[in-house]
Amino acid sequence: MWLARDVSPVSSDAPLASGTNVEGEAPVGEETVETDEATITDDAELERTLGLAGGLAIGIGTMIGAGIFVFPGLAAGEAGPAAAGSFAIGAVVALLVALPASELATAMPKSGGGYYFISRGLGALAGAIVGLSLWFGLVFATAFYLVGFGYYAVDTLAEVGVAAGAELVVPLALATGAGFTLLNVTGTENAAKLQNGVVALLLSILVVFLTYGGLDALGVVGEPSAPEEFAPFGTTPIFTTAALVFTSYLGFAQVATVAGEMKRPGRNLPLAMVGSVVVVGVLYVATVFVATSAFGSDRLATLGETAMVEVGRHYLGAGGAVAIVFGGLLATMSSANASILSTSRAIYAVSRDALLPRYASRINLRYGTPHVALGLAGGPVLVLVATGEVKVLAEVASFLHLVMYGLLCVALVALRRDEPEWYDPDFRVPGYPVVPVLGALASFALVGFMQPISQAIGVVVMLASAGWYYYYAGDVTLKGKL
Amino acid sequence: MTRVLVPLAVLEGESVSLGLMDLLGTVDVTVLGYHVLPEQTPPDQARLQYEERATEALEDVTEEFRAAGGAADYRLVFTGDRDQTVDRVADETDSRVFTVLGATGEVDRLLVVLTGDVAVDDILAFVSELVGDRPIGVTLFAARGGSDPEGLRQRLDAAAERLGAAGIDATADLATEGGPFEALVTAAAGHDAVVMGERAPSLRSLLFGEESERVASETVGPVLVVRRREEGGGSDDGENGGDGDA
């Protein structure tokens, strides 16, 4: 059993990164020793302070908002009750990637996540494309969560009797996005504890709701619901819908962006990544099942982003609607906030390697926060929120992440075929090489099922990232260097 | 020799008072320079920016400790959780005592607190070593926590005898009125530093903060805290398994 293995201090005897960018900045490379409790560099130590619960809260907190509170209506409209199958496909793809990601994370428990693994496994060009795309992927994801939040905020107003139209969705999302960015720059309160509480509360609401709804749907309590054809639109929509709802599974890789801060990384990283995918996957499939049992999928589709509120009302009356509205607000907010924080870490990781100006990772001494990176995260988010395009935002986010996931699996295979001396993961993927190969194929295949516009935007972002690399940091090499 | 850990918020301009440096001249010292970061900031990012400045300041402080008498070294940690860092480094450096900084001039008299469930033997052994043959007086203090005043009186007398045998001017002070914390703060007047034992975490410490921190802020002076010995060797949260390399 992999968990039983003791973590031994990993010394990185790898050659250090080299080359400079156009401003003459070189990647920061230094030999470090990783222990369970801290990273030890030449002159300083970096305390690991996140436990397993914190890691799970980041993973689940990032993911749960989208899959449960935004997508059921949209997905049912496209695939009918078979949308549950779409979520299941998403979960399988996410698991196929989470396992290789876990291996890489335990081999390189550093901030930066997927970017770090790919730049060390496949080199600076692939790293730059992934790193910069990840920045934008997270920006698209954050914008998507915020628009979802806007819909819930409008519904909240409606629930308390204030008539507000859909035209308020974007302004509310914009205000919240700006607020979170500002709070993250100036706030030094420990919001991580709050995040853990929010996730625990959400999970309790959902378990109660899904248990009752599930019993009802199966005819144990209440009136039996009218059976509906499982896949009214055929099988293709199941896959295109899987591509759309894959945004619900992006959070597990965000766990890897805090890999440098996790206690006992050899144990906690795999558990947090795989665990959070399993937890949300089960919840998603159950939610769609319960939702499509409450109403026909046509009805769900017309209810749109906040269809779950009506589902709550159907099963549990006004109390159910209020619980879901409240849950939706919390969930979309926690997703958006967690993503802004991940974006800031992604930018830091790239700037540390001289692929972006070092200035981007400045910290201000007053608040101790990375204000430049947070601004680079929050600014573009606001522009995207203003478009209000839920589906496109979600798909582009998924596109950019899926490319990273695919390359991450490739990087694992590349590292395994010719294992460098420093490569000593505490967790090794079961079923190698089948799992990473399938993970890569599934990730790239899912991209093929997206709308052309999402694919086009994704490709443009990747090409722009590659162009930036050649212009700005063509001399920097990172492959095989820690 | 006993090692004392001196946590120092090195980038926030915190400094060690001269009186405390002299007081610690008879023991070994590890200066723990730390910088606490909010969760938005990866510790490594802060290290890139501040390592040099922090190291310079720490080297100066460590040099001053050496000049004051004992052997001294330093560690620099960027962390999201100060208490976790103090605990870890204290374990790794085998420090039996850590300090809570405060202002003081030359130390003439120590208040040694023996109230409650603390390791009396460890505290007295440390005080003897700390005072050595210097003319520093000791007041042994305990507050009556409601029960068994006779037992506390005996504990204080036995302690005074033990220190007296080591050539230290020790007197006993059993507070019988007021809450234990208020009595301690009152008794601290006329003393330059407080030595106390670390207590098991309780609801009170969760609500109001560590007792030692509160004593330090109420009395303004430095506090030396003798750590609890781990029972069974496990660390908290069951998150055990440190390699403890130095």
Image (spheres, helix red, strand yellow):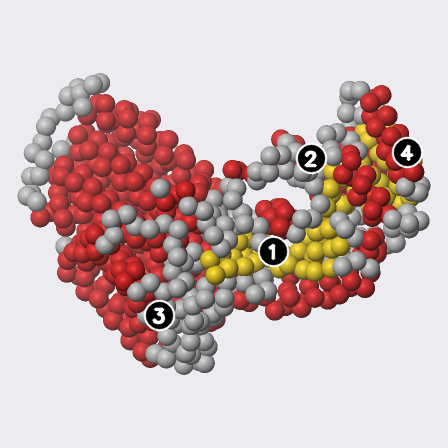
| A316 relative to A63, above or below | above
Front position in the image: B104 or A166? B104
Tag 4's secondary structure?
helix
Label 2 and label 3: CA atoms lie apart by 50 Å
Residue B233 at x, y = what percent? 60, 38
Q: Quickly name the residue at label 2.
A: B199
Q: Give the Cα separation between the discs numbered 1 and 2.
A: 26 Å
> Disc 3 designates what residue?
A479
Determine which residue is flagged by label 1. Answer: B246
B57 lies above or below B236 = below
Element at badge 3?
A: loop
For the point 81% across and 39% down, the residue is B124
Badges 4 and 1, same chain: yes
**Which residue type does callout 4 highlight?**
Glu
Residue B78 left/right relative to A129? right
Mark 4 vs mark 3, foreground winner is: 4
Q: Are marks 2 and 3 on the same chain?
A: no
Label 1: chain letter: B
Picture quadrant of residue B172: top right
Say what secondary structure mark 1 lies in.
Answer: loop
Rendered location of residue B71, percent (x, y): 76, 59
In front: mark 1 or mark 2? 1
- Give the mark, 1 or 2, whose residue is nearer the N terminus: 2
Residue that mark 4 sits on: B161
Q: CA distance from mark 4 to mark 3?
A: 68 Å
Q: Return the chain for callout 4.
A: B
